[in-house]
Image (spheres, rainbow, N blue to C red):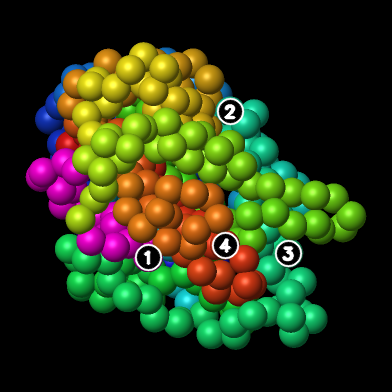
Amino acid sequence: MSSHTRPVLRRPVVLAACLSIALGTVGYLAFDPGSASATVAEQAVPASAARTGAGGANTAEVVKAANAFLATLSDEQKDAVLYDFDDEAKKTGWSNFPTPVVERNGLKLGDLTDAQDAAAMKVMAAALSKQGYEELVEIRKADDYLASLSDSGDSASASPTATRTPPSGAPTDGATGGPGGPGGGGGGANFGSEWYYLSFFGQPSKTGEFTVQYGGHHAAYNITYAGKNVTMSPTLTAVEPEEFILDDKAYAPLADKRAATIGAVQSLTADELAAAEIDGSFDDLYLGPGNDGPFPTQPEGVLVSSLTKKQQAKVTAMLRTWVDDLDEKAAARLLAKYVAEYDETYIGWSGGTTIDNDQTYVRLDGPSAWIEFSNQPGASTDEIHQHTIFRDETSDYGWE
């Protein structure tokens, strides 16, 4: 969607302002003091961020890029891109489906001027590492590739709402794009890199709490900052097909995630593989778009700390391919935190353990880190279609 119709100055903002007066925090920051429509509340940093955050975030750099982008916008565009931090739209405005099957929050990049689009992408370049930003660009290229198939009539599936069987034991609430509802994200809708959106939940601030939400069809980032702490939970990265050629250039988005995930699970011995098998079958993500939990109370798989050092290194390499999508310093601190929790972290699989099996499903479940890697049959091509999700159970959509 190109804008949201709810006024920015909503009840949660008023409550936040009252709290900020009582607590002595910053209440409102405005781009134009004479325009209430360009105003949104700054969210105070919760104490839980200090307890579970790892620090090291390049918050000031992201805020600078965000403010530079906002400065390019009209008041109407600012209304469309700025939300209250606690707005429920944050949890519903991302998906593995293309728009308009599931509408996104904020401003569509394809509707921006070249200068505005460039400024929007600088926000993501600041928030992500070089590796993470390149992966985002390649996922967008994959959507351009699918658009070219749709334009030529070569798409294997023209239905964007083909249903999928819910995974055994998964929620069955029928949420779009989640395990209980339509999955995959087939062809025939609006593919392409122009169909990506950017929004902010809370005022970008070096000292407050705010979320950068960016996404389209096969990528969705919810990157929340709270002072020096950052979480990228949840982040969806996906691709179909695994490899493709566009404009005479070869692309392979998620290649590092594929190789590291399969390498970790295939490092297990036959006995460990048997013990690591997760009950049920999964043809999509268990906690993907539309299904935010609860996380399973009983982890399945094998305990990572019970593995050899060489096997643990394989698991760490798998973790790294997700965590290292963040800016480097914060990523290093988060990775150290997750590795320190291996005595409570499990790796498991279902369906298969090879990259060419369209039933392969791998999960990492720790007290903090949660990763799912899901192969499935192609929705728009005859090739493998992959969805992945990264969450932090201590900071999903930020901290409470």
Percent coordinates x, y for residue 318 in the rendering: 45, 32
Q: Using the numbered discs, state the Cα–Cα distance from disc 3 to disc 1 in whole angstroms.
A: 24 Å
In the rendered image, is residue 216 in sight?
A: no
Which mark, by number, is residue 283?
1
Question: Left or right of 90: which side holds 274?
Answer: left
CB contact under 8 Å: marks 2 and 4: no
The nearer-to-camera label among 2 and 1 is 1
The nearer-to-camera label among 2 and 4 is 4
Q: Residue at x 49, y 34 (%)?
A: 263
CB contact under 8 Å: marks 2 and 1: no
CB contact under 8 Å: marks 3 and 2: no
* Magenta residues, start to end: 280-301
Q: Main secondary structure of the magenta part?
A: loop
On the image, which quarter does residue 400 sit in?
Answer: top left
Mark 3 crowdedness (10 Å alpha carbons): few <14, some 14-19, many ≥20: many
Q: Which residue is mark 2?
A: 129
Which mark, by number, is residue 384?
4
Q: Which residue is mark 3?
A: 145
The numbered mark, 4 or 1, whose residue comes first in the sequence reads 1
The nearer-to-camera label among 3 and 4 is 4
Report helix, strand or loop for mark 4. loop
